[in-house]
Image (spheres, rainbow, N blue to C red):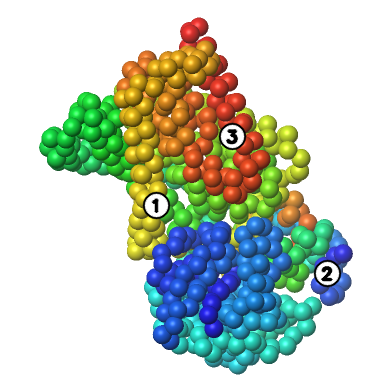
Amino acid sequence: MNYQVEGAFNEVALVSLLDMEPRKSGRIVEIRGGHRLAQRLEAMGIRPGVEIIKVSSQPMHGPIIIQVGNTQAALGCSMAARIMVMKKGD
Amino acid sequence: MNRILLLGNPNVGKSALFSRLTGIHVITSNYAGTTIQYKKGNMKWEGRKVEVIDVPGTYTLKPTNAAEEVALGMLRDEEENGDGIILNVVDATNLERNLNLTLQLLKRNIPLLIVLNFWDEAAHKGISINAKKMEEILGIPVATTCAVTGEGVNELMGKLKDAKKSSYEYDYTQKWQQVGKIVDDVQCVTHRHHTMWENLGDLTIQPLTGIPIAAAILFLTFEITRFFGESLTNFIFDPLFKTIYLPFISRLFASFPEFLSVLLLGKTPDPLDSFGILSTGIYIPFVIVLPYLFSFYLVLSFLEDWGYLPRLAVLSDTIYHRLGLHGYSMIPCILGLGCKVPAILSTRILETERERIIASTLILMAAPCLPQTAMVISIMSPYGGKYLVLIFGTILAISVFSTYLLNSLLKGETPELFVEIPPYRIPRLSVLFNKLYMRLCSFISEAIPLIMLGVAILSLIDSFGITQSASNFLGKPLLYILGLPPQVLPVVVTGFLRKDVSIALLRPFFLPPEQLAVACIFLILYSPCISTVFVMIKELGVKKALQIIGIMLTMSLSVGGVLNLLFRIL
């Protein structure tokens, strides 16, 4: 089950949070993967439709820090790989 | 109403509010997961006694770890059997995210009241919330507070009686749209540029700058602890003990029968060799341990309240992953440098039992607790730094090896890090010193009786001459494997009570430094102290606790044995 926002997006414009450059922002479009992951992320307000800023990433597959609203959170890189983002300005 | 449950997201100030309401001091910090077990207290309200419960924080009513399960369990229990209300503590600077839980609580069959906490910080960040309008929309009272300073708490008390079940209706599948609508209606945000603090804060999580900063902070933590601890011991506590306390008690008990005065004051004037309950038994905890404990917890409390620890967790995540843990295990590990008991408890912030077992092993083995560290430094320092490096280096290496082994033996995988990074906050001195005071008090009230008991037992064994026969029989393995004299055996036994005492008690044997180092490593690793064992049994069960102790005993004997052999050959 995927959590998609209304409306069609061009697959090409989508980038995973992992691949996005640090200090860039975008809008979450889809969370790929299990229901449980989507639920955990949602509990902290990380869900399709919200604006997200990638604050930093750590080397050697380290965690990614993101900001949603006034909340900053750190998440592991394979979690980040499953969060698809539409970059701002693209 | 006879009970108040404080419920809300992690790190929104529930514990600070609990302290305000009940007058009971609890540990508060600036990171998610400070409160891992619920805390009960009473407050006076309209001339009656009302129970207040500080519940561990949760983002949702679908729990993902042990601490969140506690929260849900308490809510269910109250809903079914109780006559209580819920104070939903909300972080006013994060309204949208917090309302997610609020909406879930609105559906429950229990009276509710919302507390918008961090009210001052929200104003500072250009966020203003119309509490009146929020009351109208949700149909329940909304209070605004700054729990740390106590602002708004009196008004909150006045609103308690108005708490009620909400009639607010919404479609659960449209939850976030509802949240969005409420936020749009009640919140107004003035745009504002990044402050200098935020920009500086950003540097601590970018890898290029963050790693050197982390190294510097860890180094400073170590140096400040050492410097303050050493200075307090050498220039204040030791002179006070020797010039005022010791002459005083010596005169006081001078006329006592010899048996008693030996028990209380020991045989020699040196407080570390005498074994007296009132000499060694006071000197170890107050002169050697307390100064280091004071300075370590001073620095730790500052880092906790500032909000640095979760950032350190992020930076060290990659290293922890090799051991089967994620970076948030850093927090229990750092607590473990002070005392193992709160450290083992705080492993509840980890998601799986596998992680808790691995983390507990790492906490227990990676470094001794602070009282032991202080004792090791004090006993080894005459022989130079190389023995200290040898002792602490060996222990760290063994712990990494053991944890690595556990990680490959235990089935299951390592969950990924997923935690909130709190904003940096300037630590409040009153909160910081209060926390420091609580931690020192718990050392004084829990550890000191055990230290004295340990010293007393040893002194009695010594005076009855049991030592010789028992040691000769049971001490043989020590002699053969570790190369230590069998007389050391009673020290091992008392070590189970208080491990810092056991290390102090090595001194009168006048061992050469190599043997002393082997003995220190063995005593640090062979088993946790009795208080820690109880907590482990409670948290992990008897079987898991015994398994971990088994690993520790095996490792301590084999490493001690190998070192002993190496020393003999070299």
Q: Nearer the viewer, residue B156 or B134?
A: B156
- Circle 3 sits on which residue? B549
Q: Secondary structure at mark 2?
A: strand
Number of callouts in the render? 3
Disc number for residue B442? 1
Apparent side of residue B555 relative to residue B246 in the rendered image (left or right): right
Give the letter of the chain under mark 2.
A
Residue drawn at 23 percent across, 26 percent down:
B267
Confirm whether residue B288 shows in the render.
no
| Cα separation between marks 2 and 1 | 52 Å
Position of the N terminus of chain B by quadrant: bottom right
Dot in front, 2 or 3? 3
Disc number for residue B138? none
Residue drawn at 56 percent across, 74 percent down:
B5
The spot of residue B375 in percent (x, y) is 37, 33
Specify whether disc 3 shares its chain with disc 1.
Answer: yes
